[in-house]
């Protein structure tokens, strides 16, 4: 039996929230619900929702941030990161997850 029972959200690294949000809203019907500044990760995060699905667009606020470094590599335009809903308890997940994952 799989430990995964659903998908909590999907995160996509983008260069610009101002350019990306309208695309996801117009083309795919997502609703933009909020944008926050996450200073410790050097990110701006836009939250988009469609039905039960949530998407996060991740814009680096500094070139030396993890997302900024990733996007600076050749041919890296955007990347998807997802988080699964799991039967595994949070305590077990914290022991298993690689450093830097939330």
Image (cartoon, rainbow, N blue to C red):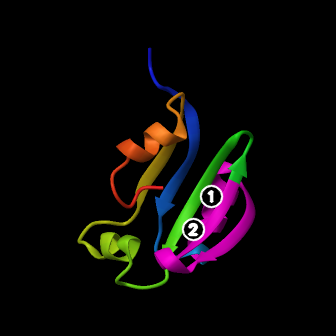
23 relative to 98 in the view: left or right: right
Q: Residue 24 carries which label?
A: 1
State the SS at label 2: helix
User: What residue range appears in magenta?
Assistant: 19-48
Q: Residue 32 carries which label?
A: none
Residue on which the image places disc 2:
20
Q: Please state the horizontal and vertical placement of residue 12, each as a whole percent of the image.
A: 49, 58
Instruction: Kindly check if marks 2 and 1 are in contact, taking CB atoms under 8 A apart as contact.
Output: yes
Q: Please state the horizontal and vertical placement of residue 30, each as a whole percent of the image.
A: 70, 52
Number of marks: 2
Q: Does the magenta stretch include residue 25?
A: yes
27 relative to 15 in the view: left or right: right
Q: Please state the horizontal and vertical placement of residue 52, each as a whole percent of the image.
A: 71, 39
Q: Which residue lies furthest to the left in this view?
A: 74
Comparing 38 with 63, the one in front is: 38
Comparing 23 with 76, the one in front is: 76
13 relative to 32 in the view: left or right: left
Q: Which residue is drawn at the image coordinates 37% and 84% (left, top)?
A: 63
Q: Which residue is drawn at the image coordinates 56% and 37% (left, top)?
A: 7
State the SS at label 1: helix
């Amino acid at each position: 039996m799989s430990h995964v029972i659903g998908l909590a959200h999907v995160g996509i690294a983008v260069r610009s929230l101002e350019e990306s949000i309208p695309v996801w809203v117009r083309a795919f019907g997502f609703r933009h619900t909020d944008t926050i500044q996450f200073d410790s990760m050097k990110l701006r995060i836009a939250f988009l929702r469609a039905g039960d699905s949530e998407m996060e667009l991740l814009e680096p606020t500094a070139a030396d941030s993890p997302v900024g470094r990733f996007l600076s590599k050749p041919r890296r335009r955007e990347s998807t990161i997802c988080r699964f809903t799991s039967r595994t308890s949070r305590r077990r997940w914290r022991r298993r997850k690689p450093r830097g994952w939330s």
